[in-house]
Image: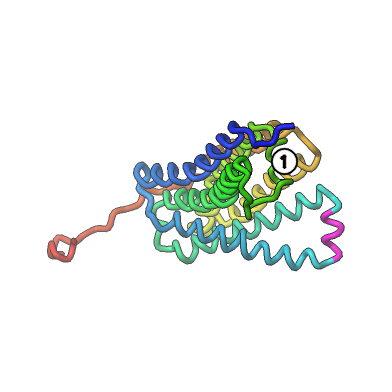
Amino acid sequence: MQSTIPVLSIVFMAISALIGIAIPVVLYIIFRKKNKANHLPFWVGCVTFVLFALVLERVMYSFLMKTSFWLTVSNNIWLMGLVGGFFAGLFEESGRYLAFKTVLRKKRGNDANGLMYGAGHGGIEAVILLSASMIVNVIFSLQFNAGIPSVLGTASAGQQLIAMPSWMFLVGAVERISAVALHVSLSVLVWFAAKNNKRFWLFPLAILLHLVVDMAAVVLNGLGLNVWILEGVVFVLAALLIVLAVVVWKKNHTVEQPAVVSEETPVEAQA
């Protein structure tokens, strides 16, 4: 029986960790350089995800788990997907909408800021859920293989990593690429909902679409579907959402008008 975690598994862990960090960094650079987006929406997206998805949504779950309804939900994969998808959509899309209506209200002149927000929202999720966990796995694996006791895991955890196929450590990276694409697309929908009251319907639509994608992932995973088929389904859903976001963008995008400087304005005041 193999007593060490395969080197290839550790390499794939490291690659996944780097991909999780690279995704938001690359998008940040693209939206900043090519689309002239501001810095602030990216960081607002990061904070909003943490507050609404990791704090407020978790608080809601803590209350729900104390009810008799939770026993029914936890024993039914379809209800689990429905409830989980609804909460994810409700909290994350509401967070987007509130951020666009408040903190980023003065940044709505440049539609690229909606893209930048999506990069931050989805990017920090990739860093927290993928990169952080993979970095912990790498450190633990190196310690485990060296026979060094670790506070990061137990011997049974090491055996689980040994038994896991090396390629499985790349699945998370593939998943995060689709997830970030979804977040950027949903951000476009909510951006225009917040910017134009006549397009408010895009906000509940974003909640519904978020629900559908998350529910599909939960249900298909619960049914034991092959992981690559599952990721393929999520990829297709992400692609469809990208197409929808492009259509919405083309119909609603406006070019930011530069501020007009009066000819009488002193040069010093313009600086």
Within 10 angstroms of label 1, few (less than 14), some, or many (20 or more) residues? some
What residue sits right under mark 1 in the picture?
A: 159
* Residue sitting nearer the eye, 88 or 195: 88
Q: Magenta residues?
A: 68-74
* Residue sitting nearer the eye, 146 or 43: 146
Residue 167 magenta: no
Q: Main secondary structure of the magenta part?
A: helix
Query: Is residue 119 rendered to the left or right of residue 72?
Result: left
Image x and y of residue 30, in percent? 40, 42
Residue 70 magenta: yes
Q: Which quadrant would the C terminus be assigned to in this image?
A: bottom left
Image x and y of residue 190, in percent? 55, 54
Image vertical order of residue 206 relative to residue 222, above or below: below
Query: Is residue 242 rendered to the left or right of residue 83?
Result: left
Image x and y of residue 129, in percent? 60, 50
Image x and y of residue 84, in percent? 72, 54
Query: Is residue 168 rendered to the left or right of residue 183?
Result: right
The structure residue drawn at horizontal position 63% and vertical position 55%, both measured from the top left corner, is: 151
Please say which color scheme the image uses. rainbow
For label 1, the SS is helix
Image vertical order of residue 262 relative to residue 7, above or below: below
Image vertical order of residue 252 relative to residue 105, above or below: above
Whether residue 108 appears in this view of the structure is yes
Residue 222, quarter of picture: top right
* Residue sitting nearer the eye, 223 or 105: 223
Q: Which quadrant would the N terminus be assigned to in this image?
A: top right
Amino acid marked by disc 1? Gln
The structure residue drawn at horizontal position 71% and vertical position 55%, both measured from the top left corner, is: 86
Whether residue 182 appears in this view of the structure is no
The structure residue drawn at horizontal position 37% and vertical position 47%, both measured from the top left corner, is: 32
Figure disc tally: 1
Query: Is residue 228 rendered to the left or right of residue 256?
Result: right
